[in-house]
């Protein structure tokens, strides 16, 4: 039994969404988590609570607010419309924005933990050895946080791949635009196409498992629960 | 050419106010009790401590002034901390070559005798190991070589031997003293061990409660009766020495010093090897006439040039021997029995086994 063209598109869309979201999240979260780990600002806990919200909120609640935000009348939606970038709600770009919010804590928290474990001394030593701030980041900080970085990327990727509620709320179910695997599976089950549901679910299971095996196999320090 | 450092900083317990000149050659020890401001001094020189109104200059290079602050990585300092702090994800070799790989190297590593250090410190077989597989002593040696391989203009060392155990420390001190002296690089060496001061440094800065209370050549300052060093139970004198012969039969070596030849237990160094011999004041006794029937091999004739009563019944004598000064610590009882006074001719006796 082969995947239908529609299922293949959903699979491709899911992977594309996960890759893009993870990439953007890492770009945002590296400096953000560094700031969170190092700041002595006394209201840091407010930011931390805000970052952790997607962990506890029902996806429908998060999706609902995101929908409001992304709709043509919402702040972000209006902004995008104004610069001629089209409608955000029920679009792939909207999904990327939603995923980034939804998976934010999964990327921020491992990174923050890793950054907190970095002591000032090795960085001072590196500075006396002639390393400028960028070289210190590249040669000392990055290798030290590597397990956390991998952990963050894997969690962000896996969490985006399995996203359902938020996607349904802000993306709907448009094949080729917003229909991801989890929703396609739901569709198949609803229409009693169990075989296709099996196939897609199996593929998702396999991808997740292979990903984790690769990470655990290459990085003995890696812990998913290391948050 | 001098290294000039001046800064003021108020801490909870004390105020540090230093304005000092450090010779741009040789090893300068900075000695003082914990919390006196020694480490802060090094951090200011390295640019790791941002203190307003501090001034730091090395020769014509101004590293910090009112209008200027050169970042640590642009200063060209090498720093060895109390703890080795090796980069755990890099091998010994990668640690040592860290700065070279950043493209900081200006000259060939030969000039800084890096290979020499690697072999003398016994690091050659460890080059591919990761830091966590090394002992504390090995790690600290790597840290020292790493700092030197960065080709610094000034080498800063913050109690580099304090994490080593005593046996290792004594052995390592000799090596380090000789190697640092041959570096042709100013070294600022912070310590609270008088043994390290005597063995390793040529110049000495005394710091107490944030202030510089004495400064000069190490050998002179060690024997200065006005300084606290000469009054302490650990008072020491130091002499430059050269190995001139070995007596393998009796397991002894003879050292030539400007005070005269000294016998010592066998030193595992070749003839004409230069070293510093440190004499503990409490290991030196005095007699008024030359003793014939004594087990002590080192008897030198000298003249008492000063004495100082110390607490707990001891007297420190400063004896001039062939224009060198050697300290002797005796009890107040012996002092009055022998009726010693300034100008008095004495023979000082030093046990060979006490020389190090």
Image (cartoon, rainbow, N blue to C red):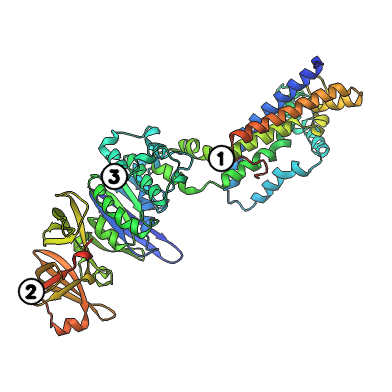
How far across and how far down the image is residue B264, in percent?
A: 18, 61
Camera sees residue A179: no
Query: Quarter-wise, where is residue A15 in the image?
Result: top right
Q: Which chain carries label 2?
A: B
Label 3 vs label 1: CA separation? 35 Å
Q: What element carries label 3?
A: helix
Q: What number of labels is visible? A: 3
Q: Residue B290 carries which label?
A: 2
How far across and how far down the image is residue B186, in percent?
A: 26, 48
Label 3 vs label 2: CA separation? 42 Å
The answer to whether the residue labelled 3 contacts the one labelled 1, judged by CB atoms less than 8 Å apart, is no
Between label 1 and label 2, give the one nearer the viewer.
Answer: 2
For the C terminus of chain B, the quadrant is: bottom left
Q: Report whether A145 appears left or right of A64.
A: left
Judging by the rendered image, the residue that carries numbered circle 3 is: B120
Judging by the rendered image, the residue that carries numbered circle 1 is: A145
Query: Quarter-wise, where is residue B76 in the image?
Result: top left
């Amino acid at each position: 039994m082969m995947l239908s063209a529609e299922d293949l598109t959903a699979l491709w869309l899911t992977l594309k969404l996960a890759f893009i979201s993870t990439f953007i999240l890492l770009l945002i979260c590296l400096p953000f988590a560094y700031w969170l780990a190092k700041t002595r600002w006394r209201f840091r806990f407010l930011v931390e609570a805000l970052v952790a919200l997607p962990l506890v909120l029902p996806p429908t609640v998060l999706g609902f607010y995101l929908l409001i935000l992304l709709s043509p009348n919402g702040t972000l939606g209006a902004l995008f419309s104004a610069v001629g970038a089209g409608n955000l709600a029920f679009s792939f770009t909207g999904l990327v924005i939603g995923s980034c919010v939804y998976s934010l804590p999964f990327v921020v928290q491992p990174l923050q933990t890793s950054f907190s474990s970095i002591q000032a001394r090795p960085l001072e030593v590196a500075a006396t050895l002639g390393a400028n701030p960028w070289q210190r980041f590249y040669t000392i900080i990055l290798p030290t946080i590597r397990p956390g970085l991998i952990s963050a990327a894997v969690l962000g990727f896996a969490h985006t791949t399995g996203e359902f509620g938020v996607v349904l709320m802000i993306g709907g179910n448009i094949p080729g635009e917003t229909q991801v695997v989890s929703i396609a599976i739901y569709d198949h089950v609803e229409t009693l196409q169990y075989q296709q549901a099996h196939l897609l679910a199996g593929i998702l299971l396999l991808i997740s498992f292979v990903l984790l095996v690769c990470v655990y196999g290459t990085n003995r320090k890696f812990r998913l629960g290391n948050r | 050419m001098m290294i000039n450092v001046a800064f003021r900083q108020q801490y909870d317990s004390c105020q540090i106010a230093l304005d000092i000149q450090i010779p741009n050659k040789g090893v300068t020890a900075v000695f003082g009790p914990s919390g006196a401001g020694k480490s802060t001094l090094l951090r200011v020189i390295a640019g790791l401590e941002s203190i307003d109104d501090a001034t730091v200059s090395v020769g014509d290079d101004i590293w910090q002034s009112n209008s200027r602050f050169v970042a640590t990585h642009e200063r060209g300092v090498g720093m060895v901390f109390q703890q080795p702090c090796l980069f755990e994800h890099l091998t010994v070799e990668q640690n040592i070559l860290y700065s070279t790989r950043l493209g900081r190297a200006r000259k060939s590593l030969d000039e800084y005798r890096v290979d020499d250090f690697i072999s003398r410190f016994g690091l050659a077989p460890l080059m591919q190991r990761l830091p966590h597989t090394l002992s504390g002593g090995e790690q600290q040696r790597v840290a020292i070589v790493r700092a030197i391989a960065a080709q610094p203009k000034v080498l800063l060392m913050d109690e580099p031997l304090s994490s080593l155990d005593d046996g290792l420390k004594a052995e390592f001190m000799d090596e380090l003293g000789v190697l640092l002296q041959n570096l042709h690089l100013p070294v600022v060496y912070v310590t609270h061990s008088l043994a390290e001061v005597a063995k390793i440094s040529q110049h000495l800065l005394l710091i107490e409660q944030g202030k510089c209370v004495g400064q000069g050549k190490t050998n002179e300052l060690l024997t200065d009766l006005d300084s606290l060093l000469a009054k302490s139970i650990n008072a020491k004198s130091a002499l430059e020495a050269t190995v001139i012969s070995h007596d393998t039969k009796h397991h002894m070596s003879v050292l030539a010093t400007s005070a005269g030849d000294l016998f010592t237990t066998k030193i595992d160094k070749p003839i004409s090897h230069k070293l510093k011999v440190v004499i503990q004041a409490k290991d030196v006794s005095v007699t008024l006439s030359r003793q014939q029937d004594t087990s002590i091999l080192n008897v030198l004739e000298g003249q008492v040039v000063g004495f100082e009563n110390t607490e707990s019944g001891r007297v420190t004598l400063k004896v001039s021997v062939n224009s060198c000064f050697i300290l002797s610590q005796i009890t107040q009882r012996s002092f009055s029995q022998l009726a010693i006074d300034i100008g008095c001719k004495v023979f000082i006796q030093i046990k060979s086994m006490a020389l190090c």
